Image (spheres, grey):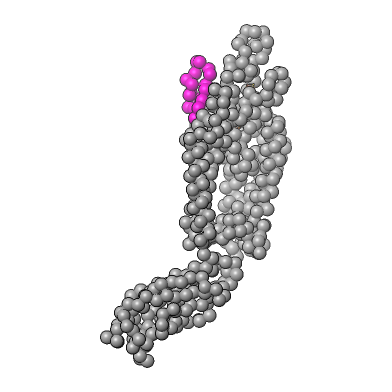
């Protein structure tokens, strides 16, 4: 990642030697980001309302009584935008994931971490829900610091108690939301409305998820983005000098110096007045003036803070802004680089392959295999038979009545057990059947047979297998 550290007394990369949220002794350096307001914060707030509404309404949206989104990893059953995917559709899901990853890579190469700052659920909940509640209860950064460092007074107990209770309730809500995406809203309602013992695994799942969210949003916070998130850690390889990021315009801002020195003309004049506000509002505690850093989640708080300062000192806004390293250094922005073209081509290939796979995907699937370890059975009535296993999958949302017919001359299908093959929606069926033929009609020891499978009278598969029997009964 491109970078500048303009202080000549420092190693240009020395700021990378330490994390802002970790002290020299290895203990946590609690980040108290100052409240921010401004253009970007306003629109991030509006967008967060929209995204949170979509996120919370998602599990309640049903089409023909089934969920519109379901990510049931336990049963490997997925419904994505109303389309159901079975374990047998794993190749489709892998394609979908590949498309998603290539899209994210392409998007990041061009627009940097816009996702992190504007749409990532971690940032949405942390900055737009939990942080706002914290400001409301404990006040701005300085008041929070004073409260935390002060003794346990009645006021502190009340404020901390209230905050933990509200955080706990919201974490419970998010825990239920995640479970609703995993097992469906109906299941979650059952878990909530029935005794815990009736759905012990689900109940424990709800508690575990709620506990994880409470831990993440009340304590772990920015560490999730810095230490855990794989996307954040990939930035070093995804971003280049043409990627658009939250950047400090060091060409315009340096040499920085306090405004009083600039006014007295005892310091050279860059536009940065070294007020430190961009650092104080940063939720990850970094100084964007050091350049692009892995810890930066592109939340735009420093842009808003600096713009406010620039207006106050009557200088143009945009000292910190969305820009690429090249647009700052060389004054031009190149969007369609070789990398972008390469990723776009790959993305188009993957999308085309996915569309063709979806177009040829079957809603009903049948698999027929010979019963293992058996060749043929000679029957006392002069007939000979072979035994087969059949597996049928109904991926549709309607019941399907399935029939099987042999296309070979003089060969009959004899179903073992219940002859009424009705597959419930979204179910798998396993059964057995014999192919039976008069022994005297057997002309070859191994005969190819076509078996036609139909559902509700409409053919959906034609499977070739073979029938084995001794010629002339030998
Ligand atoms: S907020 Fe702007 S002026 Fe103040 S230190 Fe940061 S970059 Fe410089
Ligand atoms: S450097 Fe600016 S954009 Fe990046 S995380 Fe900090 S405040 Fe947000």
Q: Is residue 373 shown above or below 290? A: below
Residue 137, picture quadrant: top right
Q: Is residue 268 shown above or below 74? A: above
Outermost residue to the left: 474
Region rendered in magenta: 1-20
Whether the magenta-drawn stretch holds residue 390 is answered as no
Q: Is residue 101 among the parts visible in the rendering? A: no
The structure residue drawn at horizontal position 50% and vertical position 15%, both measured from the top left corner, is 9
The rendered magenta stretch, by its main secondary structure, is classed as loop
Residue 87 in the image, given as x and y percentages of width and height: 49, 61
Whether the magenta-drawn stretch holds residue 5 is answered as yes
The structure residue drawn at horizontal position 70% and vertical position 25%, both measured from the top left corner, is 308
Seen from the viewer's position, the closer of residues 461 and 144 is 461
Residue 39 falls left or right of residue 270: right
Seen from the viewer's position, the closer of residues 148 and 293 is 293
Seen from the viewer's position, the closer of residues 50 and 14 is 50
Residue 32 in the image, given as x and y percentages of width and height: 63, 31
Residue 343 falls left or right of residue 219: left
Residue 309 in the image, given as x and y percentages of width and height: 69, 22
Residue 109 in the image, given as x and y percentages of width and height: 52, 36
Outermost residue to the bottom: 381
Residue 383 falls left or right of residue 13: left
The structure residue drawn at horizontal position 57% and vertical position 21%, both measured from the top left corner, is 250
Residue 225 falls left or right of residue 195: left
């Amino acid at each position: 990642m491109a970078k500048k550290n303009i202080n000549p007394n420092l190693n240009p990369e020395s700021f990378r030697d330490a994390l802002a949220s970790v002290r020299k002794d290895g203990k946590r350096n609690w980040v108290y980001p100052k409240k921010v307001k401004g253009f970007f914060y306003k629109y991030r707030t509006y967008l967060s309302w929209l995204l949170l509404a979509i996120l919370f309404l998602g599990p309640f949206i049903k089409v023909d009584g089934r969920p519109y989104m379901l990510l049931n990893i336990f049963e490997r059953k997925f419904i994505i935008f109303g389309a159901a995917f079975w374990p047998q559709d794993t190749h489709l899901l892998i394609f979908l994931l590949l498309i998603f990853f290539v899209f994210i890579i392409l998007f990041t190469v061009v627009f940097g971490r816009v996702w992190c700052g504007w749409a990532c659920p971690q940032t949405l909940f942390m900055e737009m829900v939990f942080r706002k509640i914290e400001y409301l209860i404990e006040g701005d950064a300085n008041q929070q610091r004073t409260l935390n460092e002060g003794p346990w007074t009645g006021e502190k107990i009340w404020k901390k108690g209230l905050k933990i209770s509200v955080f706990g309730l919201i974490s419970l809500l998010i825990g239920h939301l995640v479970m609703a995406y995993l097992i469906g809203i109906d299941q979650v309602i059952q878990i909530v409305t029935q005794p815990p013992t009736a759905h012990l695994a689900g109940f424990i799942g709800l508690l575990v998820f709620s506990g994880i969210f409470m831990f993440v949003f009340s304590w772990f916070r920015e560490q999730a983005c810095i230490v855990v998130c794989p996307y954040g850690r990939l930035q070093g390889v995804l971003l280049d000098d043409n990627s658009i990021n939250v950047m400090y315009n060091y060409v315009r801002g340096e040499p920085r110096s306090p405004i009083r020195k600039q006014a007295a003309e005892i310091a050279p004049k860059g536009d940065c007045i070294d007020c430190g506000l961009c650092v104080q509002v940063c939720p990850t505690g970094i100084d964007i003036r050091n350049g692009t850093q892995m810890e930066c989640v592109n939340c735009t708080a420093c842009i808003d803070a600096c713009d406010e300062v620039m207006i106050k000192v009557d200088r143009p806004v945009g000292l910190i802004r969305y820009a690429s390293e090249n647009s700052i250094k060389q004054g031009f922005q190149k969007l369609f680089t070789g990398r972008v073209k390469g990723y776009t081509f790959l993305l188009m290939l993957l999308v085309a392959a996915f569309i063709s796979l979806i177009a040829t995907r079957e809603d009903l699937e049948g698999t027929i295999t010979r019963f293992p370890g058996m060749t043929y059975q000679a029957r006392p009535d002069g007939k000979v038979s072979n035994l087969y296993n059949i597996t049928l999958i109904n991926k549709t949302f309607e019941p399907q009545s399935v029939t099987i017919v042999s296309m070979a001359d003089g060969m009959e299908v004899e179903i073992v057990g219940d002859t009424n093959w009705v597959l419930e929606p979204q179910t798998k069926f396993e059964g057995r059947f014999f192919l039976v033929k008069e022994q005297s009609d057997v002309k070859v020891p191994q005969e190819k047979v076509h078996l036609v499978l139909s559902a509700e009278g409409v053919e959906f598969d034609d499977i070739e297998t073979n029938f084995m029997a001794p010629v002339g009964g030998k």
